[in-house]
Image (spheres, grey):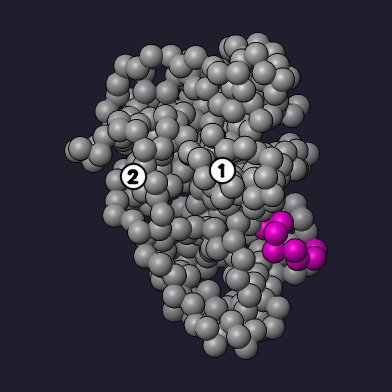
Amino acid sequence: MRAQQYDQRDNKLHLNEIPVPEPREHEILVKIACASLCHSDVMHFEPNDQGLILGQNPVTIGHEATGTVISTGSGEAAKKFKEGDGVGFLCAVECCFDCANCRTVHNSWCVTGKTKIQGFSLNGYFQEYAVVDARAAMVLPEGLDVKTAAPLFCAGVTAYHGIEDCELQAGQWIAAVGCGGLGHLGIQYAKAMGLKVIGLDIAEQALEEARRCGADHVFNTAKDQDWKKKVLEITNGGVDAAVNFTASKRSYDDCPSIIKPGQGLLMVVGIPREPLQLNALDIALRRYRVKGANNGTCYNMRPAIEFSAKHNIRPHLTTYKLEDVPDMIELMNSHKAQGRMGVVFD
């Protein structure tokens, strides 16, 4: 089969021919219908001190996909699926899925210490077939299309929990910092939960996407010198939560100034190259609180996906061919992409 593989030796992608994998007892073999690009995939190519762990080399990139079951392993979890099922899945493998960390925190912190992430330390999904752990997979709910739902299985779960885990009430204000691949989904989730939304970005096409997704106000933070003042006026003192979907350290530095003092929240989602710098006095004096959200576990994946189906949450997906993945990465780096970009396989 064909696979887009990252090679550390030249820091480039190569379209390679590799064997189709065989499912083990607890795995299912999936024919990939759609694999979509996440900013984390681009971290392969850039210096980063935020904990990105690579393994085999070369490695197929991509950790966000949907597909159709081709065959299953012999184990109980795998046998819950049948040939032809449309499925989505998360990318953590080799963990136990049963310890407290796997159930309530993230599979990366499994007590076994053996977790690997497909697309980074093992082959991912920009290839024609993949094996995935049956315990981290689910059949797509009615209404979700196997060729367009791929972004929901990283961006969707992440954006859903980025909004839901703020624990706000309908009518409260939330800022979506970054309105692109993650943010445009976050805005849809926020509006479905009855929240009032301010979209912030530096790209006009992302702000236009935010408007289409229902944002109540949008500001170009690179062009509007008074955007912070305007946010404070609109919200009567600051947003109840600022959810940062970007990889921009500067945008994180800007967030505290628009958060309502007291119980206001900074939700960390995007991962900049540089470590964040938080003022300890701000935290101690409760100027704002800090939480994080991510692509979740198999236990909180299902609520996010079912909410998406129920409320018609749809990623804006621009489709490409497998050989176009380098072009997709260039578009992401240049901030010219709208929504999510994905490879749809024949």
Expressed as whole percent of the image width and height from the top left, the position of residue 123 reads: 42, 29
Q: Nearer the viewer, residue 78 or 64?
A: 78
For the point 59% across and 61% down, the residue is: 292
Badge 1 or badge 2: first in the primary sequence: 2
Q: Is residue 151 magenta?
A: no
Instruction: Tell me the element at label 2.
Output: helix
Q: Amino acid at mark 2?
A: His
- Of all residues, the one furthest to the front in this rendering is 112
How many numbered callouts?
2
* Residue at mark 1 to residue at mark 2: CA–CA distance: 26 Å
Task: Report the side of 67 relative to 226 (left or right).
Answer: right
Where is residue 203, by image quadrant? Answer: bottom left
For the point 39% across and 46% down, the residue is: 53
Where is residue 127, by image quadrant? Answer: top left
Q: Nearer the viewer, residue 240 or 62?
A: 62
Q: Is residue 169 magenta?
A: yes
Instruction: Specify the label residue 44 is tagged with.
Output: 2
For the point 36% across and 38% down, the residue is: 55
Per the rendered image, the range of residues in magenta is: 163-170
Q: Residues within 10 Å of mark 1 (few under 14, many from 20)?
A: few
Instruction: Specify the label residue 112 is tagged with.
Output: 1
Q: In this rendering, is residue 315 above or below 18?
A: below
Task: Report the side of 290 relative to 114 (left or right).
Answer: right
Expressed as whole percent of the image width and height from the top left, the position of residue 179 reads: 53, 56
Q: Amino acid at mark 1?
A: Thr
Quadrant where the N terminus sits is: top left
Where is residue 323, by image quadrant? Answer: top left
